[in-house]
């Protein structure tokens, strides 16, 4: 297609290809960021749910509440590290019922909650408010008797 502009002839052949390339770049970059962000959040979600499950089991297998708390934190950090989440913040909280002060007694049911966050990739510090993060949490509930060894009495 040829046009006249102020007495000059302008040749626009090939300009559609250039426009298509630029539009592709402009549209593909946000799509790439979305896909990478979804993968990062999925990896974090998988890590947090695995950490909650492992921490609850470690707590239940501990001989008492103090040792159980230490083991739960260590196991949660290790489970997150297994997913490549080494430097993420980790918060481990343990509750139990019906004996909230002594979780390793009777028929207590332990609930471990893991809270963490992953940073979204390729996104700089926006407006000085810090790197954008996505908060994640997971719970896992274990009855204490499920992982306790039962001593049989001799007859």
Image: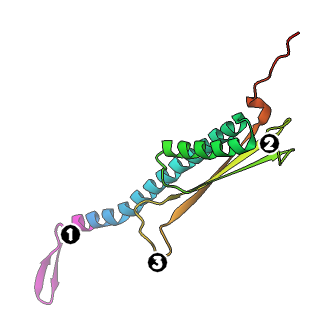
Observer-nearest residue: 47 or 88?
88
Horizontal and vertical percent for residue 59?
69, 40
Q: Which of the two discs, 1 and 3, sits closer to the camera?
A: 3
Q: Which residues are magenta?
A: 1-19
Q: Quadrant of the C terminus?
A: top right
Q: Which of the two discs, 2 and 1, sits closer to the camera?
A: 2
- Mark 3 — residue? 127
**Res 109 → quadrant:** top right
Q: Residue at x 59, y 44 (%)?
A: 74
- Mark 1 — residue? 15
Pointer 2 and pointer 1: residues touching (CB < 8 Å)?
no
Observer-nearest residue: 139 or 30?
139
Q: Considering the numbered disc 1 on the image, is that residue within a helix, a strand or a loop?
A: helix
Q: Considering the numbered disc 3 on the image, is that residue within a helix, a strand or a loop?
A: loop
Q: Residue at x 82, y 17 (%)?
A: 152
Q: Residues within 10 Å of mark 2 (few under 14, many from 20)?
A: many
Q: Earlier in the sequence, mark 2 or mark 1?
A: 1
Work out which residue is located at the far left of the displayed protein and give it: 8
* Residues at marks 1 and 3, CA–CA distance in whole angstroms: 37 Å
Q: Residue at x 80, y 42 (%)?
A: 103
Q: Residue at x 17, y 66 (%)?
A: 14
Q: Residues within 10 Å of mark 3 (few under 14, many from 20)?
A: few
């Amino acid at each position: 297609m040829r046009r006249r502009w102020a007495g000059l002839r302008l040749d626009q052949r090939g300009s559609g290809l250039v426009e298509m390339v630029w539009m592709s770049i402009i549209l593909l970059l946000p799509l790439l960021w979305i896909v990478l962000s979804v993968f990062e959040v999925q990896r974090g979600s998988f890590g947090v749910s695995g950490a909650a499950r492992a921490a609850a089991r470690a707590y239940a297998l501990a001989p008492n509440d103090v040792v159980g708390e230490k083991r739960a934190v260590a196991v949660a950090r290790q489970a997150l590290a297994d997913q490549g989440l080494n430097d993420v913040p980790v918060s481990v909280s343990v509750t139990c019922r019906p004996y909230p002060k002594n979780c390793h007694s009777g028929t207590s049911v332990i609930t471990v909650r893991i809270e963490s966050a992953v940073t979204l990739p390729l996104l700089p510090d926006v407006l000085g408010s810090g790197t954008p993060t996505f908060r994640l949490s997971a719970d896992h509930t274990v009855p204490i008797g499920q992982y306790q060894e039962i001593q049989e009495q001799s007859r």
